[in-house]
Amino acid sequence: MAQLIPIPGDITRLQVDAIVNAANSSLLGGGGVDGAIHRAAGPELVAACRKLDGCATGDAKATPGFNLPAKWVFHTVGPVWYGGNDHEDDLLAGCYRRCLELAAEYHARSIAFPAISTGVYCFPPERAARIAIDTVKAHVENSGVEVVNFVCFSEETLAVYQQLLAESKAHRGM
């Protein structure tokens, strides 16, 4: 079983095989994590993203990491939260599932996920974390990924991931 590790910090500085970019559908850069990744990777990233012709919500596409420590960037488009009745949970789960499929395709053994859709897309953080953890656990075995980092920008998000992963371990131990 892969290690699932919540960590604080800057996803652009991690020495992992792949980082996940919480992108918008154009893949051409934006604010938050997306903007930070584009700035850190350099102008080659936007040039590579232009060739991808955008990305649908719940899907993901890969580019090289360019100036990042990570070899790959998996760009995924999370759902905007509209109250939970617009398939947001399924679309968010699709982001994590599709990134793990890309990890298998690109032979990534370590991957770092941000808290997809919890920023300006307003997905409730605890609900998003639960979906992230459950989806990764359900699909990581087939991916070849050995280490999954959940990179948390805020202390509040980190606490949510720590609690959910601790509960999950305690439940497994029963």
Image (spheres, grey):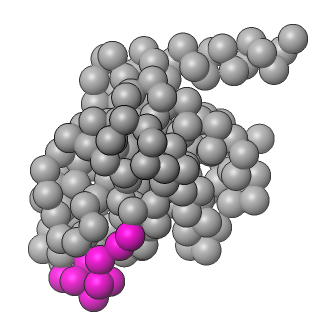
Q: Quadrant of the N terminus?
A: top right
Q: Residue at x 17, y 45 (%)?
A: 32
When asked about the image quadrant of residue 43, the answer is bottom left
Which of these two is toward me, 52 or 141? 52
Which of these two is toward me, 70 or 77? 77
Q: Is residue 74 above or below residue 137?
A: below
**Horizontally, is 70 left or right of 39 in the view?**
right
Q: Residue at x 44, y 67 (%)?
A: 60
Q: Can you give x and y, in whole percent of width and height, for residue 170 in the image?
A: 74, 12
Q: Pick out the residue farthest to the bottom.
A: 51
Q: Can you give x and y, in whole percent of width and height, for residue 40 in the image?
A: 18, 57
Looking at the rendering, the stretch of residues picked out in magenta corresponds to: 47-56
Q: Residue at x 57, y 19 (%)?
A: 164
- Decide if residue 111 is in sight here: no
Q: Quadrant of the C terminus?
A: top right
Q: Is residue 55 magenta?
A: yes
Q: How many marks?
A: 0
**Horizontally, is 149 left or right of 1 in the view?**
left
Q: Residue at x 33, y 67 (%)?
A: 65
- Decide if residue 53 is in sight here: yes
Q: Is residue 98 above or below residue 172?
A: below
Q: Can you give x and y, in whole percent of width and height, for residue 123 in the image?
A: 35, 36
Q: Can you give x and y, in whole percent of width and height, for residue 142 in the image?
A: 75, 59
**Horizontally, is 143 left or right of 86 in the view?**
right
When asked about the image quadrant of residue 19, the answer is bottom left
Q: Is residue 70 magenta?
A: no
Q: Pick out the residue farthest to the front.
A: 85
Main SS, magenta residues: loop
